Image (cartoon, rainbow, N blue to C red):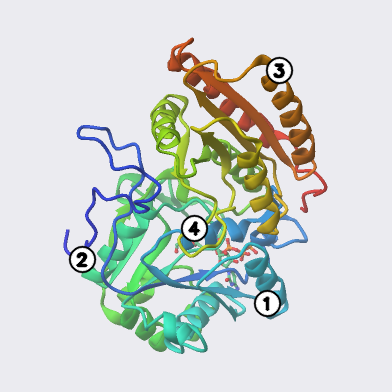
Amino acid sequence: MEGDICDPDRAAYPRIFPPREAGESDHQPFERCVNFPVSVVLPAAGTGERTGLQTPKQFCSFLGRPLISYTIQAFERVSWIQSIVVVVLKENMALMTDIIQRFQHRKVRVVPGGSTRHRSICSGVLALGELEGEESHAAVQPKVVIIHDAVRPFVEADFLYKIAMAAKEQGAAGAIRPLVSTVIATTSEGYLDHSLDRAKYRASEMPQGFTYDVIYQAYQRCTESDFDFGTECLHLALQYCGVSAKLIEGPPTLWKVTYKRDLAAAESIIKETLSRSACVVTGASAQAVTLAGTLQKAARTWDMELNVIPDLKGDNGSYLLTEWNFILVSGSLPCLSEVEAILTDFKAANRAPLHPFVIVWVHLSSSDELSISRTMAEQVAIMDLASAAKLQNIFLYGIQIHQSKIPLEVYMRALGSLCGNLTSLHRKKPRNHSPSQ
Ligand SMILES: Nc1ccn([C@@H]2O[C@H](COP(=O)(O)OP(=O)(O)OP(=O)(O)O)[C@@H](O)[C@H]2O)c(=O)n1
Ligand SMILES: O=P(O)(O)OC[C@@H](O)[C@@H](O)[C@@H](O)CO
């Protein structure tokens, strides 16, 4: 597809996902890239009245992490997004800055919002044209602006790609979903006037994309009434720039957190997603990498996503300690130092895990290379280590695979049921963090 400069078969993170084998089904996420600058505006200056809570819904925490942090993370994981502008109420600027620092968000800038959603979005769009500080080095004025409600945390890279490409081609693009209920028009006395043919209408959702010029002009030309009562950016593009947006049906995950019940739904999705992902840390051992590849394939039968990494540090040396669980695979003789190293890395990253992390230490031994006594001694040492790890909110498991004795598949099933525990672990309340509203 035009603009798609990445080889679609190349994984977005080549050092994590081994190249797919010929004919292997498309289990692994890969990232399609665009070749023009894209920035994001996340309006988050609302008060969330409809939730009935004191805390604005974008700042409500799940597993110790505010909702808006999950949304930002969904965007900063997309490598072709150059910058993110979060728009919050002036009194929440310090809180938002703290969240960015605490969760190590990158390429994010905070600007003050307005009294309505359109005024907040406009503030974010204008900020993209005024690059300041280090932003001016890293980001250029975007060709395409993606606008996305900060309270829609479940957005996928592939759909963002479709919206960005359509916005570049058409000038504007928006996500839509089928209507669940029929839309009816009422009389001023509150009676049915007429009902709309549901087949002709769709729900307008987010993300939406616009070329920078279109959305900038639309906000320059719209009226005060638009600013005060409007809810649809696509309408402004049509009304004031003559641009008819390309509409793309999005996945059901695009829904917006609006009412209190939506918070509970969002929390269960977050827990479910977290418990089905893990990083396999292999070190440099070729044997461990091979075992990791086998694990990765087997994990698909457990509906788990395993990302294989050589160590806990990312390309730029920063720790990859986001919300992953970890499976530490050692091909060499089982030595505690590998486990101790990963726990030390956790400590060095200075990130108290806000929800239980799981480390499964899988040792592949080609024979009974260990005497029983050493195994026993080692098990005691592992148990001590596991007790210490638990104080860090980390659950440490160890599995020794004697390849000679039992087929690998049997171990895979054991590991599968252990990984299945991740879900139950995440159902536990995070230690020491009473979740805020
Ligand atoms: N003045 C406003 C109003 C809303 N928003 C943002 O626009 C998104 C969608 O709006 P909505 O769901 O209506 O949020 P609230 O206005 O906070 O909700 P409510 O109407 O229940 O108060 C939210 O991320 C919200 O923070 C904004 O940036 N500035
Ligand atoms: O109307 P609310 O302020 O609840 O939320 C904004 C939504 O209307 C908006 O996100 C989509 O309809 C797309 O424009």
The quarter of the picture where the N terminus appears is: bottom left
> So how many labels did they put on this image?
4
Q: Which residue is mark 2?
A: 3
Kindly report which numbered mark, 1 or 2, lies closer to the viewer in this rendering: 2
Give the residue type that dot 3 points to. Ser
Give the residue type that dot 2 points to. Gly
- Between the residue at mark 4 and the residue at mark 3, the CA separation in whole angstroms equals 38 Å
Q: Position of residue 322 (x, y in %)?
A: 58, 53
- Between the residue at mark 1 and the residue at mark 2, the CA separation in whole angstroms equals 36 Å
Residue 388 image-quadrant placement: top right
- Between the residue at mark 1 and the residue at mark 4, the CA separation in whole angstroms equals 29 Å
Q: Which residue is mark 4?
A: 314
- Determine whether 88 is above or below 195 in the image: below
- Residue 373's tag is 3
Q: Are marks 2 and 3 in contact (CB under 8 Å)?
A: no
Give the residue type that dot 1 points to. Met
Label 4: how many residues lie within 10 Å, few (<14), some (14-19) or many (20+)?
Answer: few
